[in-house]
Each structure stands twice: as C-alpha cells, then as structure tokens.
Image: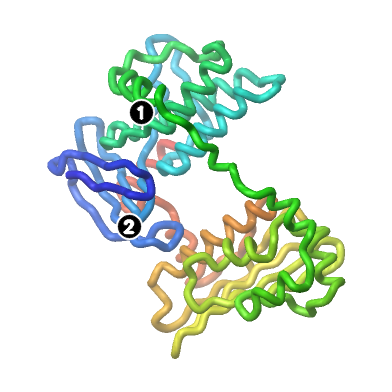
Amino acid sequence: MSVHVPALDDTVSIDAAAVTRYQRIWAPNGDPAVEFVLEDGGGARPLIITVGDVVYQPVSPRAVLGSGLGIEITDAPHLVSYAEMEDAAERAARRAEGPGPFDLDSLGASFLLVRCFIVAATLNGLRPVRSVAWWQRGWDALGGDLWPSNYRADPVWDELALEAADLELTSSAAREDGGAAAARVGVEDFRRLEPTLTAVGLDEDFASLWRASVPITPARFAEILLNRVDDARADVALYPEGAGSVDVTVRNQDSSALLQFSWPDAEELHVDEIRITGSLAHTGLFQRLIFNTERLASALGFQRITLLASETGALAFARTGYPRDPELHRAMLRNFR
C-alpha cells in the first residue's frame, strides 16, 4: 500500500497485510487523518497519515547502535512527524556548524535521536533524503567526533546518504527578519487588517506597546492565529508591562466558537476559554484552534501555555493524546513514562 504526501515530496509504502485496524481521526492541527495499527513482527506500532504529514513511532537507540552499553534518551518523544524529523535534523546540523563551544554530550544525543527518527521513517517505506543530508552535514562538520558513534551498518541509510550527497539544502529559516519588521509597526498596519484582526483602542500608544512587546508583525500574528479557520475574527488588547489578551470568534449561521487567551507577562500564555457550539463542533475546529494558539505562543516567545479544563473541556483535552487506538496509547504511556 502506497500513499504519496505531496507536502513532503515522499511516499509511505507499507505491506497492507501488516495493517490490523485503522480509524479516521482529527490531527492536532484539525486536519482529517487516518491512524493505522501495524503488526509486522516487531509488535504493534502506529502510523498516522494526515493531509500534509506522516506521524510514526521512533525506533529505540538499540535499533541503530552496534553492540555495547545500552543507551536511552530519556526525553525522546513517543511519536514524531516527518516535518518534525526534518526540523530536528536541520537544527542538529546548524548547532554542529556553529561557532561553539559545544556540549558534545547533548549534540551526540541529538544526532542519535534524529537517527532514530530517520530509521523509523524508512520502516514505513519513506525516503527522508533531506533529513539524512542535514544529519550527514552536521556529522561531517564535527568530523564524526561525537559519542555515540558505533552506528549499525544499514544498507538503506547508505543508499539514502549517497543520494543526499548530491542534494542542495535550503534552510527552512530563510525568511524575513520578523523582529525587524515588528519594530516598524504603525497604526496603519492594523487598519489594513480590520475587521479580521482588530486592535482594541487602536492609537499610537497601542502601536508603541506592540513594538515594545510583540516580536512579530500584526499580519504575521493574524496569519498564524487564524490559519485555516474560516470566518474567524480576532480582537487584540495590549496593556502596560507586556500583558495582553485575545478573543477569537467564529460565527457560522446558527453556530459559533470562542477562543480566549491572555498573558500577564512574557513568560506564560493562558488559555482562558474555548467554546464551540452547533455544527462547528466535532469538525476539527477545536484541534485547529489549539494548534494555532501553540504556534502563536512559540512565535511570541512564551515559555509555556497553561489552561484549566473542566467538564466537557477536560475530556476534550484528555483526548488530544495520540495515538487514538486505546491499546497503542496504553502501551506508549507505559513505555515512555
């Protein structure tokens, strides 16, 4: 069975006989997805295919290292997406190419973890050539002088590395300096976005507060927050000392949705309320709003997101865990505590 994912320029290729069950789910970003449970001699494992990504279980370090002492990566994720793998490979390479000084233990663990991601991807028939190219580039930058270095012989890896040698890499970070653009924000930048994004009490003082506390432009703020949320509008309020709040509303005939979040300082963003009614419920909108909020929090530089889930909301947040398959979810909770 083969599924091409154009956004990745790669193809999942698995034995259909290994699929024991599957179900339709909503991905964390609100996209429709299919979760497969695979049994191929190594125990049950998940494979999730979304509109633009593939999510799977990394292999353990034992699967990529030669004989010797057992090594564990204590903060390894129980699931990783193809896009996250590519990002991790690029970050590891750029750290290795940096001016130093280096924490070689940390770098060695990063390269090991990325290799676990890549090898797991190949078990699903994927050919992550770009990730291998970044890994090899970083490894070569340090002359392979990292521990651990006793990687198993892997013909598939060697084949991908040969192909990667001819690949011209393009950094995903190659974009306009958002901080510099945000430092030039004025009242007219907000006027152009109304009513999609409305600044509460817009005047030059508001623009000054934005320049002092928000590291991205209003256009980028709206792009991240309202991405793929039809008929959405956002109201933004800013206060002295770096505090702020946002109300996102969606109205669709007899249905509505509300997302409210705020921040008292530059450290923490708090989700105050999410309410979705009518036909907008159970459409993936909840996941999309949370996904966009997480991306925005990252772009704004917050260290953490907090929330208080109660009643139905508590169940909704509890169910954002993946994989959805109960057996796989219980197994992963046991293995990755």
User: Quadrant of residue 40 in the image?
Assistant: top left
Farthest residue, direction bottom: 254
User: Quadrant of residue 203 in the image?
Assistant: bottom right
| Label 2 element class | strand
Q: What's the mark number on residue 218?
A: none
Q: Residues within 10 Å of mark 1 (few under 14, many from 20)?
A: many
Query: Residue at the location (69% across, 55% down)?
Result: 300
Tag 1 residue:
119
x and y percentages locating residue 205 in the rendered image: 86, 71
Q: Is residue 39 left or right of residue 163?
A: left
Q: Is residue 45 left or right of residue 215?
A: left
Tag 2 residue:
33
Residue type for callout 1:
Val
- Comes first in the chain, label 2 or label 1: 2
Of the 4 image quadrants, the one containing the N terminus is top left
Q: Is residue 245 above or below residue 13?
A: below
Judge by depth and name the residue closer to the eye, 232 or 166: 166
Query: Residue at the location (65% across, 49% down)?
Result: 176
x and y percentages locating residue 246 in the rendered image: 67, 71
x and y percentages locating residue 72 in the rendered image: 48, 24
| Label 1 element class | helix
Measured Cα–Cα span from mark 2 to mark 1: 23 Å
x and y percentages locating residue 147 in the rendered image: 53, 14
